[in-house]
Image (cartoon, rainbow, N blue to C red):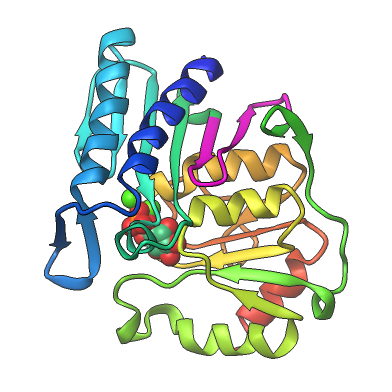
Amino acid sequence: MIEDLIYIAKEAGEIIRQAHGTRFSIEIKSNNVKNLVTEVDKKSEKTITDFIRKKYPSHSILAEEGGETKSSSEYLWVIDPLDGTTNFAHGLPIFSVSIGLQYKGETVAGVVYDVMRDVIYSAEKGSGAFENGKKISVNSNEIIEESLLVTGFPYNVAENPEKVFERFIEMLKVARAVRRLGSAAIDFCYVANGVFDGFWEVHLNPWDICAGKLIVEEAGGKVTDFTGNQISIFNKTILSTNGKIHNRMIELLNSV
Ligand code: IPD
Ligand code: CA
Ligand code: CA
């Protein structure tokens, strides 16, 4: 089925790429001016869900813009049709399509399509992680002071939930540098291919996490919450690293 995930992520990505730089309608979600959805998010999602409903009509779907289609199937597709909507809405070319597939509650396949770089990150459970078909792995850096980290902020950041400001400052002081790209799915993939040493964020959703988590794990990395516990895609808090700096990051995240 991985070929289907890749195929449909690319189809959806093509729609997004063609819309990049053009005019499209933008709406505000849940009364928060920071939280946007565009007509392109919806078109991308429809392309993906139409494909699944046609080819796998019995499967369940959890997609960001359309909510849940529940069935008795053991298969669940977890879809972010456009991860990085704020970037996309402002014309910043960093956004992705993220599709994860679960079987009996376990993620068995995941694909993230970095649309403007035309790069597919993919993983199947037990078979490694790939970037455009080439095997990737996390880096081996053990020194937090030499690490390049990435994070993201939830749409209610102004309320400083989960001490996001204090945690950001702490990491900024210790790491070599901290980035904020604006697409959680891409953040995971850059941990998987060794560009970033670590990624942390609070208040994520299952569609932000599902594919990326498997890709990092299959690349030899680690994904937990801030106490080091295993997480499911329904956990909101994630720490994803090369494994080597994981404990040090936990210490720092909990030192504030
Ligand atoms: C967002 C992006 C961003 C992260 C936000 C997410 P969206 O997803 O992944 O990097 O910081 O928490 O909600 O809304 O663009 O699909
Ligand atoms: Ca998202
Ligand atoms: Ca989205």
Depicted 186 relative to depicted 59: above or below:
below
Q: Examine the structure image and report whether residue 125 is included in the region drawn in magenta.
A: yes
The reply, left or right, for residue 19 in relation to residue 196 is: left
Looking at the image, which residue is at 19% across and 38% down? 66
Q: Examine the structure image and report whether residue 126 is included in the region drawn in magenta.
A: yes
Whether residue 204 can be seen here: no
The image quadrant where one finds ligand 1 is: bottom left
Depicted 145 relative to depicted 192: above or below:
below
The reply, left or right, for residue 37 in relation to residue 83 is: left
Depicted 136 relative to depicted 30: above or below:
above
Looking at the image, which residue is at 29% across and 36% down? 44
Of residues 121 and 235, the one drawn nearer to the viewer in this rendering? 121
Looking at the image, which residue is at 28% across and 27% down? 47
Of residues 172 and 11, the one drawn nearer to the viewer in this rendering? 11
| Quarter assignment of residue 204 | bottom left
From the top left corner, tell me how far across and down residue 241 is, in percent: 70, 59
| Quarter assignment of residue 33 | bottom left
From the top left corner, tell me how far across and down residue 71 is, in percent: 24, 19
The reply, left or right, for residue 50 in relation to residue 31 is: right
Q: Give the range drawn in magenta.
A: 110-128
Whether residue 152 can be seen here: yes
Depicted 108 relative to depicted 191: above or below:
above
Of residues 88 and 249, the one drawn nearer to the viewer in this rendering? 88
From the top left corner, tell me how far across and down residue 198 is, in percent: 68, 64
Image quadrant in which the C terminus is located: bottom right
